Amino acid sequence: MNTLPFSKIRFIILVVAFCVLTGGIGYRLGEQKTTISVRGETGIVVKREQPGSANVDFSPFWEVWQRLSASYIDRASMDSQKMVWGAITGMVGALDDPYTTFLPPKDNKDFKEDLGGQFEGIGAQLGLKEGRVMVIAPLKDMPAEVAGIRAGDYILKVQDEDTAGWTVTEAVTKIRGPRGTTVMLNILHDGDTKPLDVSIKRDTIKVASVESWTKPVSQVTEISGTEFAKNLKISTSVSYIRLSRFGDHTNEEWEKAVSEVVAAQTNGSKGLIFDLRNNPGGYLDGAVYIASEFVGSGTVVSQVNSNGTKEDYVVQRTGRLLDIPLVVLVNKGSASAAEIVAGALRDYKRGTLVGEVTFGKGSVQTPEDLPDGSGLHITTGKWLLPKGDSIHKTGVTPEVLVEMEEYEATADAQLAKAIELLLQ
């Protein structure tokens, strides 16, 4: 896979699915805050000098290391490399910030591949809530969604292993696997009291980040089972764009979809439904690019940095959808970059937000690639919407709240409400 350019890496927003890494071997090391680096050819190198002005005692780490080396019953299985990575994970976990994370080389590679849009697994973005593994967003038409997995589901077991205390990385590692193999998940749907087992066949997950259509309202099958559609016989067309993430290929995919929407407007389309539901985020520069499609000028989002400075990210281009009637769909799976776009459109009164309160991920992580292929993602700032509101832990509240009680393919009440608003 190609290395991400620095400009994108600097302005990345961590996808929620891979933003939680806690615990690990060496929690004591975490408390000591001592730096360790790994060199593939020369082995483990420990920098013993004190980190800045910190007054720390690193001797407990070496004491534990030596006792394990001398007394552990299965010393032949001890992997020094993994122990060092575990120690770094413990140090980062001691910060008690779920978004500041250390990713060993494989996890760092998987993270980048996900933003690139291809991997093997079940097609679901994962996070943590109240210490349990939770589905943030199943990807459309992928094995997880086909098997009935929903946003907000708790994954209680993977192949009969209890997930209590797992990190997201552990869950992803257990759930992923070669195409064609199956994984058994014990799932508790949001609002249910009894879990159920779901068998999912893994596949290659290659997902375009943008999908779109324009069609007569009477032919929108996704709402055919709703109350709104019972007596609907309207031939007026509406346009629809769904953005599933802000990834490597989003901008070029977006431009193609917008060209189709512009053409549909000349043929009488009533307006656009912009669907950000179950979008877990992605690149910040992608969020600014998309918001600029709809907003003529002004600040899209501001970043308050750890050094006390503030940066404003402003509209960067002249969009082609500045005047189109617009309804934006969001839900509890809309996070990070998706919340920035939704919040900006709400603050500028550019469109009506419909759905549920969003996830509430409003901090920025600066990723750094380390020499051994691992990655360190450090929380270096927080986001503020154009009116100054923070979305961190509070999310974005839509003007029209529509809870999703139905999960059937033909009973999308949120989409039905969006169409109803466009037709008014």
Image: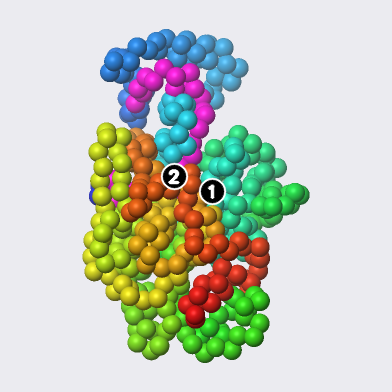
Display coloring? rainbow
Q: Which residues are magenta?
A: 8-37
On screen, residue 198 versus residue 128, left or right, reads: right
Numbered label attached to residue 418: none
Q: Nearer the viewer's eye, disc 2 or disc 1?
A: 2
Residue at horizontal 48 percent and vertical 18 percent from the top: 28
Q: Which residue is mark 2?
A: 392
Q: Position of residue 215 (x, y in %)?
A: 48, 83
Residue at horizontal 26 percent and vertical 53 percent from the top: 313
Residue type, mark 1 in image: Leu
Label 2, label 1: how far apart the Cα atoms are: 18 Å
Mark 2 / mark 1, whichever is N-terminal? 1
Q: Which residue is mark 1?
A: 126
**Residue 139 can be seen, yes or no:** no
Q: Position of residue 156 (x, y in %)?
A: 67, 44
On screen, residue 79 versus residue 133, left or right, reads: left
Residue at horizontal 63 percent and vertical 39 percent from the top: 163
Q: Residues within 10 Å of mark 1 (few under 14, many from 20)?
A: many
Q: Position of residue 282 (x, y in %)?
A: 39, 53
Q: Position of residue 217 (x, y in %)?
A: 53, 83
Which residue is more in the foreground, 66 or 238? 238
The quadrant holding residue 291 is bottom left
The quadrant holding residue 408 is bottom right
The quadrant holding residue 179 is bottom right
Which residue is more in the foreground, 200 or 80? 200
| Residue 65 located within the stretch drawn in magenta | no
Which residue is more in the foreground, 416 or 195? 416
On screen, residue 13 versus residue 26, left or right, reads: left
Label 2 sits on a secondary structure element that is loop
Residue type, mark 2 in image: His
* Above or below for 333 versus 130: below
